[in-house]
Image (spheres, grey):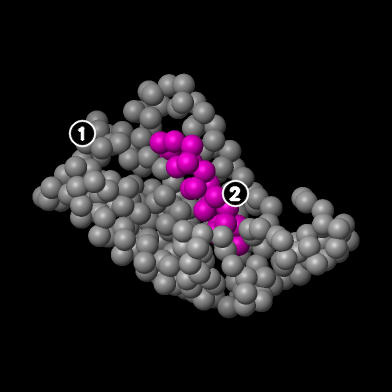
Amino acid sequence: MRRYPSPSASALSFGPGPLSTAIKAIIVANVVLFVASSFSRIIIDELGLVPFLFLRELRLWQPVTYMFLHAGMFHLLFNMLALWLIGTELERIWGTRYFLKFYFVTGIGAGLLTVLFALLPFGFAQQVYGSNVIGASGAIYGLLLAYALYFPDRPIYMYFLFPIPAKYFVLILGAIAFYSSLGTAGGVANATHLGGLAVGYLFLKGRPIHPLAEVKYRYLKWKYNQVRRKFDVHAGGREDDRDRRMH
């Protein structure tokens, strides 16, 4: 943890705080596979999600393994940054077990919906059939949907410039993903993004947001602050002031 010389330095804080248990494990797994795939293209070919191979050769592992592969450094960086910024508070509210369950359900569900999308009798869908889909974006979009439900009015900086309430931010991203999925260039990734949003919504619809979750979060936040005061460290996580921003 970083130490700050005085409480006033908290205005310089960035992000939701230290890496939580599940997020740390997910990031490590993604980085390890990214490094490994940099030395061997076979990893991408075997573990990426290719709808044609998934259906014809029953490569049933692909809807899971594709979530841990990335096409480049920036692809990995932005996905892991989003995971940390959005997922940290959700894991604190839900707990590690439920967070991992949600992450894998939305990621795998997004992959399976991508396969179904590839079977549609349209040109923009058929391009996906033989494509190799990789990346954690399906699960990330599911987390973004959950974040917007829990913190609908929390401002998020779009393109790091324009503050938009989370609920509208998700709607904008969903509209962009839907429109792009109908084109001939961006249908692969955006079909998966839409899948993550859809699965995340359906999953949470079956588990209504309960006021006890907020009580639990407040209690854990209080305990965290007690430790902070004891060791004189800066507290990460949610702030209650209206001017808080996510970058």
Can you see residue 95? no
70 falls in the magenta region: yes
Q: Which mark is residue 92?
A: none
Q: Residue at x 52, y 76 (%)?
A: 153
Identity of the residue drawn at 69% across and 52% down: 18
Whether 111 is among the magenta residues is no
* Residue drawn at (25%, 54%) of the image: 181
Q: Residue furthest front?
A: 161
The x, y position of residue 240, in whole percent, is 66, 75
Which image quarter: residue 171?
A: bottom left
Q: Secondary structure at mark 2?
A: helix
| Residue 94, above or below 136 | below
On screen, residue 226 versus residue 41, left or right, reads: right
* Amino acid at the residue labelled 1: Arg
Query: Which region shows up in magenta?
Result: 66-89
Residue type highlighted by circle 2: Ala
Q: Nearer the viewer, residue 118 or 183?
A: 183
Which residue lies at the image location 73% right of the left edge and 66% below the top edge? 11
Residue topped by disc 1: 56
Residue at the spot of label 2: 22
The residue carrying pointer 2 sits among few (fewer than 14), some (14 to 19) or many (20 or more) residues within 10 Å by Cα, namely some
Neighbours of disc 1 within 10 Å: few (<14), some (14-19), many (20+): few
